[in-house]
Image (cartoon, rainbow, N blue to C red):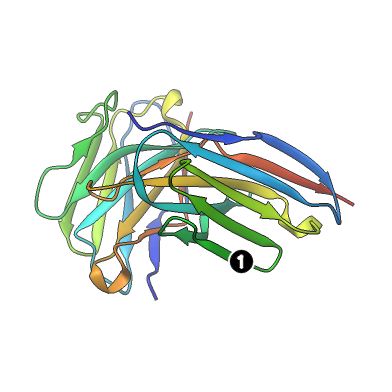
Amino acid sequence: ELKVEQNPLFLSMQEGKNYTIYCNYSTTSDRLYWYRQDPGKSLESLFVLLSNGAVKQEGRLMASLDTKARLSTLHITAAVHDLSATYFCAVDISGSARQLTFGSGTQLTVLP
Amino acid sequence: GAVVSQHPSWVICKSGTSVKIECRSLDFQATTMFWYRQFPKQSLMLMATSNEGSKATYEQGVEKDKFLINHASLTLSTLTVTSAHPEDSSFYICSARGDVGQGYEQYFGPGTRLTVT
């Protein structure tokens, strides 16, 4: 059974600081996704990581994938209040009907 | 492109009644759609995989007779919560899986918040 673990579950940080969210998964996968969810809203796609060593950046967020370590990171640079949200990673099981298994989410609060 | 809609966005119903939620892919065809449930402060849990023209595949622990899924066309899947109870109150999110043109990505709907009183 595929397990996807995120940490931390809760993250409170000051504006302007940097931090990293980690996503570990237990079995081979060929795709990993990062999503953002605002309260009461659905998911917003942030990144799709398709291969070992993949790195993608959008604004203050940068995601990377290490398939050998089965680890993805979401790095936040110089956080701003607008980044406050819950962030989920999701793993795409290789060879399946492209089902996604989600991590537990990281609730990020950026304090002024 | 790749927009998925859900209707209704929120619904309140009385215990014992049934509620139907629609999921539509607006600008692409989706042979596969997924239904997720999300309780407050929790992650998304896959309930079932809906395949056009065939029976849905339910995840372990999800009652197929309670959560009826119909995927009658390439752009519409419906989830009917039968004999709803307060514990069925949740945020239901669907996604539609695009074909090769969309890189087989999943596109998520805006969600439906169900409250059973």
Where is residue B85 shown, x and y percent of the image?
39, 25
Q: Residue at x 41, y 58 (%)?
A: A51
Task: Tell which of A68 and B82 is nearer to you.
Answer: A68
Give the residue drawn at x 46%, y 51%. B111
Can you say which quadrant of the picture contains the N terminus of chain B?
bottom left
User: Please, which residue is most extreme toward the right here?
Assistant: A112
Q: Chain of mark 1?
A: A
Give neighbour class at mark 1: few <14, some 14-19, many 20+ (Cα, 10 Å). Answer: few
Residue A79 visible (yes or no): yes
Indicate the position of residue B115 as horizontal and vertical percent values.
49, 35
Tell me where residue B100 appears, x and y as whole percent. 24, 69
Residue B110's place in the image compared with B48, above or below, is below
Reply above or below: B97 against B83. Answer: below
Which residue sits at x=58%, y=51%? A37
Residue B15 lies in what quarter of the image? Answer: top left
Q: Secondary structure at mark 1?
A: strand
Where in the figure is residue A5, as x and y percent of width and height? 52, 33
Q: Is residue B100 left or right of residue A72?
A: left
Q: Residue furthest front?
A: A68
Q: Residue at x 62, y 51 (%)?
A: A74
Q: Is residue B51 left or right of residue B9?
A: left
Between residue A56 and residue B20, name the one nearer to us. A56
At label 1, which amino acid type do we have?
Answer: Gln
Is residue A42 at all visible to an observer of this figure?
Answer: no
Residue at numbered disc 1? A57
